[in-house]
Amino acid sequence: MFRLIHLSDVHLGPLPRVRRRDLVSKRITGYVNWHRNRRDAMGGETLEKLITHVQAARPDHIVITGDLVNLALDAEISIMADWLSSVGAPRSVTVVPGNHDTYVPGALAAIKKAWRPFMSGDGADQVAFPFIRLRGDAAGETPIAIVGTNSGRATAPFLATGSFRDKQANMLRDHLRSLALERRFRVVLIHHPPFKGATSWNKRLIGSSRFRGVIEDAGAELVLHGHTHIESDETIPGPCQAVRVIGVPSASHESSALAAPTAVGPGPAKSKSGGNGKPGAQYNLFDISQPSADGGWRVRWRQHGYGDGSHTVQELKRSDFTVPSAVPVRNPRGST
């Protein structure tokens, strides 16, 4: 068995001291948004308690699907590097970028340098997307392939779009096909949700059909994403059957009960395509096992976080599902 934990949208706060020259271009809108909408909703001990609960679960690996920082300030990026080290060793923690991590031109290069141990393939000296990390190769362990992609790009003010382009798509297709032949459980990480109707137009993944085309050709056992700050459980076509695409709420968002003790619950936003309210901080835990050589994969999924009116992290939901073992995939088609 392999225990994988999925976190996303940490938005580590509070913001460090911001100089006037830092608030150039898009950062001024982000700074205002932080103080108006996120400073009070993403503070306190919410994240700290969640991470304590995560570590108590003794995961084999932790993945974080983007938006670790807020404005991609140099100070934020440096602080986040230290925070990641407190969460776990680089071999046990994998990160992919989100739109806030690549907020302005130059930010992607900065996080590649600062977070390289957590955001590069096995044995790689530099960060390149997609990257591969192979885990679970000891006797009796479940063979896992963690495949990190990047949808984060610097965008204009008021946009939170992502991008998935041809070069990355072609490389991802080749990697997934090779990993299928190795019969590994392939977990693909991306920040922006790749299914249809996932977000409003200004927060969408540009090239989502290209990403879906890769999965339809080459397959995957699981796709994990963040970005929306809500839970989601969708599917996209695969070569033999639909592939599960699972999103997780923000790891630092306080529920209404925590942010305002007189509130009744965390708000109504249960819609998979968004909403005004957001649930309290959560993480997903996946216990992945392969019961027999030909029996496919068995996944035990548990959602943990701050439930309605709760001040403590608890189990919220549970679900089990199976995924057939990797099979030979058809010839790749052209990108869409």
Image: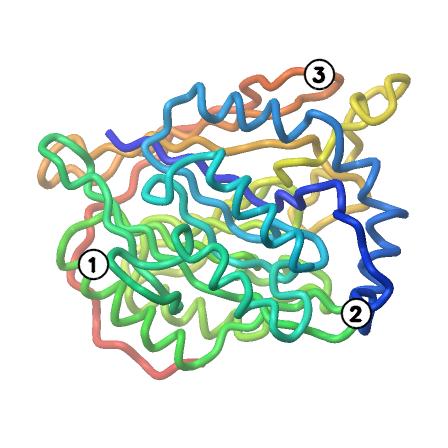
Q: Earlier in the sequence, mark 2 or mark 1?
A: 2
The residue beneath circle 2 is 26
Q: Nearer the viewer, mark 2 or mark 1?
A: 2
Helix or strand or loop: what does disc 1 sit on?
A: helix
The residue beneath circle 1 is 179
At x 48%, y 56%, the residue is 96
Percent position of residue 26, x then y = 79, 69
Percent position of residue 66, x then y = 56, 53
The residue beneath circle 3 is 310
Q: Is residue 156 left or right of residue 238?
A: right
On the image, which quarter does residue 167 sit in? bottom left
Residue 84 vs 302, above or below: the answer is below
Crowding at label 3, few (<14), some or many (≥20) Cα neighbours within 10 Å?
A: some
On the image, which quarter does residue 106 sit in? bottom right
Q: Nearer the viewer, mark 3 or mark 2?
A: 2
Q: Is residue 222 left or right of residue 292?
A: right
Crowding at label 2, few (<14), some or many (≥20) Cα neighbours within 10 Å?
A: some
111 or 62, which lies in front? 111
On the image, which quarter does residue 119 sit in? bottom left
Percent position of residue 217, x then y = 31, 69
Gap between marks 2 and 1 measured at Cα? 39 Å
Residue 223 vs 53, above or below: the answer is below
